Image: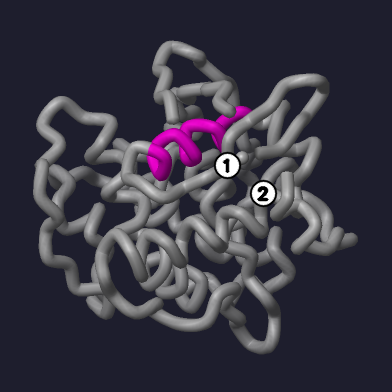
Amino acid sequence: MIKIKGNIYSTRVTTFNEFVAFLNLIKCDDIIHQEWDYFRYKFDKVAKWFYNHYLNKSLPGPIPPTINGIQVHLLDLYKLIEGLGGYLSVHFGQEFGTIGELIGLSKQDGDELKKCYIKYLDIFTSYYKTARGPNFPTKRVEVDTFSPLSHQETLAPKHTSAEFKGKGKLEHFGIILEDEEEKKLYTKSSQPHTWQQVTKAGTQSVKIETNSNASDDFTT
């Protein structure tokens, strides 16, 4: 658990419902920006739990991954992609190069960053978003974590890039739960919270928009 501004929040993930609740929680930017490095650490642990325990698979690679010697924090990548409308919006809007610049890579590293997202976060995000829908399957589905194609892309309806441009706002599900001992295990980083930045892609400004909504509630 972690206490922020007098409120106690759970970051414990040992079940799928707790996995969903954690991803709901990190949509609440006013909460997580208070302890960003702690949530980076917890996000990595949740990713490991998802692969090792929920899917019963080995990790797709080291966590955090690196691209050209630069460490890629999975939480930063996840928040940036979701803040711009999700994988499909970023893919069709060709914004991976821009996101790469935000996290310390070059614009030319966009393709490698896209592969990194697909490798680590695509099926992770797909399960979460499927759980938000009305027809969530009760059984795990077999997944290929080494596919070069996005699970979200192959299952989504066909859209043009024009349909995705401008869809930078995502509905958020805020949640207050009840998980502090682990806080001792992470170290503070001086790296800025890149997901909060405003950047430019060509002549078009790209701003990450966030909000929160406490309409859904999971208890642990």
The amino acid beneath tag 2 is Phe
Q: Residue 152: where, in percent of width, then height?
A: 25, 53
| Helix, strand or loop for disc 1 | loop
Residue behind mark 2: 39
Judge whether residue 148 can be spotted in this image: no
Q: Report whether 68 appears left or right of 95.
A: right
Q: Within 10 angstroms of label 1, few (less than 14), some, or many (20 or more) residues?
A: many
Which amino acid lies under the numbered mark 1 shown in the image of this protein? Thr
Which residue carries the number 1 mark? Answer: 11
Q: Secondary structure at mark 2?
A: helix
Q: Residue at x 42, y 19 (%)?
A: 217
Direction from residue 193 to residue 22 in the image, left or right: left
**In which quadrant will I find the C terminus?**
top left
Q: Is residue 24 magenta?
A: yes
Residue segment shown in magenta: 18-28
Q: Are marks 1 and 2 in contact (CB under 8 Å)?
A: yes
What main secondary structure does the magenta stretch of the protein show?
A: helix
- Left or right of 170? Residue 103 is right
Image position of 92 with respect to 8: above or below = below
Total numbered badges shown on the rendered structure: 2
24 or 56: which is nearer to us? 56
